Amino acid sequence: MTTMDVNMDIVPDGEAVTQSQISSVVSSAPNNSGLMVALHPLTLLNISDHFTRIKMQQQIQNPQVIGALVGIQTGRDVEISNSYELDFDTIDGKVQINHEYFITKQEQFRQVFPQFDFLGWYTMGPYPTEADIEIHKQMMEFNESPLFLQMNPFEMVTSKNLPITVYESIIDIIEGQAHTLFIKSQYKIETGEAERIAVDHVAHTTLGEGGEGSSLIAHLTTQRNAIQMLHTRIKLLHNYLDLINSKQTPVDHDILRQIAGLCNRMPTIDSADFKQEFLTEYNDVLLTTYLATITKGTNSINELVDKFNIANSTNRPGGRGRHQLYMGV
């Protein structure tokens, strides 16, 4: 297990909208709860990926996305380590969270990460609205005081501040009635060694001045071009068959035989031999990964033992051994 490197600098709250645009659901009172929220980069990457994927799939400029935040809470310290998407329905303009999906997803997540609990939820937007309050009340059925993370994907980031705001919920008495309001909470970015490597790799994916880019981007670009070319050729064959079917072009039996030959080759990937070979290679990869993990763990234990021996030998007067020290007492 690697030691976490923590950035103790508090991320200031960047305001992208004026005070008049902020909804009345946000309290202007100072936050004295003492809650400290630590965000991991994996959570932010998941949220950004969720929004981008739905936006491209639905071809909507600002789609509605909702997800759950999971992590560990110790006293007033909250560590948000991961997130996952939530299913919901929109009925009469109101969002209804699919509770069955949420419970099933949470149980599946706890099987892999038993130490993680549901801490809150996230969505997109410049500032909270009444609709977000209604969703927040639904989340309170699973956590009496969930956090609310809002990311503004359209904010122009001109500084080091992230377009993210974290809110807590409070109960305020307005005109003799209790209302649920949001109140801003401070947060910090906390990263582990693996996360630092991944984020650094993502940050250097653009081409530099020397024309050298990320090897991952080059590999993905090659794959995308290959898939795009395959799609173009399949579409060409499909259009040719449609023209023949509609009798708009003469039949060429030689081309039809070649197309039939390509189609007949496709089911071979479902054969028993292919599955056996695939499972063998898959098991080999898992075994290699397992051995690498064991080797890394053994190396860490070895380093710990060496440090323990050095510390003990340094604390003993005259560098005497254990038995000599006991005999002198």
Image: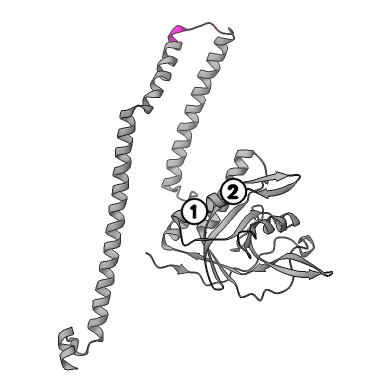
The type of residue carrying mark 1 is: Phe
Q: Which quarter of the figure is the C terminus placed in?
A: bottom left
Which residue is label 2 attached to? 100
Q: Is residue 88 above or below residue 40?
A: above
Q: Residue furthest bottom?
A: 329
Which of discs 2 and 1 lies nearer the camera? The answer is 2
Q: Residues within 10 Å of mark 2 (few under 14, many from 20)?
A: few
Judged from the image, the secondary structure of the residue bearing numbered disc 1 is helix
Q: Distance between the residues labelled 2 and 1?
A: 14 Å
Q: Which quarter of the figure is the N terminus placed in?
A: bottom left
Q: Is residue 324 left or right of residue 218?
A: left
Q: Is residue 229 above or below residue 117?
A: above
Return the x and y of residue 299 as percentages of the image width and height: 27, 63
Q: Is residue 84 left or right of residue 195?
A: right
Q: What stretch is highlighted in magenta?
A: 249-255
What's the residue at 57%, 12% (across, down)? 243
Q: Which is nearer the N-term, disc 2 or disc 1? A: 2
Q: Nearer the viewer, residue 68 or 228?
A: 68
Q: Quadrant of residue 37?
A: bottom right
Q: Can residue 278 be seen in this view?
A: yes
Judged from the image, the secondary structure of the residue bearing numbered disc 2 is helix
What's the residue at 27%, 75% (across, down)? 307
Q: In which quarter of the image is residue 226?
A: top left
Q: Is residue 164 visible?
A: no
Q: Which mark is residue 134?
A: none
Return the x and y of residue 83 as percentages of the image width and height: 54, 55
Return the x and y of residue 268 as percentages of the image width and height: 36, 24
Return the x and y of residue 56 as percentages of the image width and height: 60, 40
Which residue is label 1 attached to? 109
Q: Which of 23 and 206 is in front in this view?
A: 23
The type of residue carrying mark 2 is: Glu
